Amino acid sequence: MKILVTGGAGFIGSNFIRFLFRERPEIGVINLDRLTYAGNLENLEGWEELAGTNYRFVRGDIADPKILEEVWAANPIDAVINFAAESHVDRSIESAGDFIRTNVTGTLALLEAARKHGVKRFLQISTDEVYGSLGPTGKFVETSPLSPRSPYSASKAGADLLGLAFFETYQLPVLITRCSNNYGPYQFPEKLIPLMISNALEDKPLPVYGDGLQVRDWIHVEDHCRALLLVLEKGTPGEVYNVGGGNEWPNIEIVKLILGALGKPDSLIKYVADRPGHDRRYAIDFTRIERELGWRPRVDFAKGIKETIDWYVKNKSWWGRIKSGEYQKYYEKMYGWRIKK
Ligand code: NAD
Ligand code: TYD
């Protein structure tokens, strides 16, 4: 069995490859990643040797049909798992072009290659953000209307619809998972949790958007990976599976929890201008995957977040390298205007 994992040098993709080596060492992995700003081969350091000949890295763009042809010509591929994406909402608000190119055109190119060569499974990794924003009550179910509100979520919804269309039109065995906000090791420090931990460790301000009362449902990346392997192996093609942590938190509470764990003062919190079109609340109903595949989140949040904070404390060299250099320019661009306001 050989799996083409795209975006395997990013946060969830690299955690998934490590998870797969542990759980299914017999499965071969081809990791196709363009290595954008978010792709980092350090996320997989040490694992390449462990996996021996079962692992191969290819640097390439999922939107490039030529690279896909080369990958397929070199390897018999049984399944595709598409993690590759532009994934940060704030960047999509600054500039949407790369999001359409990778998330929509790239997914289409992968679907076409998978169809041409025939695969047993095509797992599209999607997000709860395609459903839009919730009021104070209710949860997203798989049949909730798609109502994306940012260029990022619109591009992910486009990819989902293409996947479902390939299932209906060409019977390509496409499966889709829509997960809530992940946390854990190796998350790029532009996302809420690693940004807040790393800023707190450097005694820098913690930029909280708007009133900080937006709610997200946090799930440990390990629980997400376990759900993905289950859906890959046992899910029904053509179906969508919601995956969530059952763990809703207002952003400001997460930020205070991090400060408390690090022994840093709340005075580091800096309320800044809100994200345009900021989704107020996400919450996931994961009854289907629980009922049909027996999945439930297992990682207790208090334990998972403590271990995650400890990981970033111990791995300052990992995020320190990222936050110096190019990322610094990004930070100025994204937060300069917010903080001046
Ligand atoms: P990430 O930004 O950390 O990683 C994305 C990876 O994709 C990077 O390694 C990058 O180099 C690669 N990539 C980008 N464009 C590419 C291209 N054109 N060709 C090949 N590789 C390319 O993202 P993540 O947080 O690991 O998210 C992975 C997937 O999970 C995404 O599809 C995202 O939409 C989805 N998702 C993320 C979350 C979350 O909380 N992070 C929640 C639900 C769903
Ligand atoms: P993020 O990690 O970007 O994930 P998403 O937007 O996909 O949910 O943000 C999580 C929440 O944290 C979101 O409501 C925006 C908020 N946030 C801040 O308040 N300050 C920040 O600096 C960032 C990056 C996010």
Image (spheres, rainbow, N blue to C red):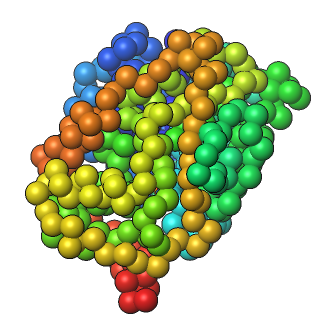
Of the 4 image quadrants, the one containing the C terminus is bottom left
Residue 169, picture quadrant: top right
Q: What residue is at 43 percent from the left and 82 percent from the top?
A: 338
Closer to the camera, 273 or 55?
273
Closer to the camera, 285 or 309?
285
**Can the viewer see residue 296 in this picture?**
yes
Residue 99, picture quadrant: bottom right
**94 in relation to 83, above or below:** below
**272 in relation to 191, above or below:** below
Measured as percent of width and height from the top left, residue 334 is found at 43, 76
Closer to the camera, 189 or 252?
252
**Can the viewer see residue 122 in this picture?**
no
Measured as percent of width and height from the top left, residue 305 is found at 27, 41
Measured as percent of width and height from the top left, residue 216 is found at 48, 49
Closer to the camera, 182 or 5?
182
Residue sticking out furthest to the front: 137
Residue sticking out furthest to the bottom: 340
Q: Is residue 298 left or right of residue 227?
A: left
Residue 260, picture quadrant: bottom left
Q: What residue is at 11 percent from the left and 57 percent from the top?
A: 263
Measured as percent of width and height from the top left, residue 268 is found at 22, 72
Instruction: Please count the marks in the image.
Output: 0
Q: What residue is at 30 percent from the left and 58 percent from the top?
A: 255
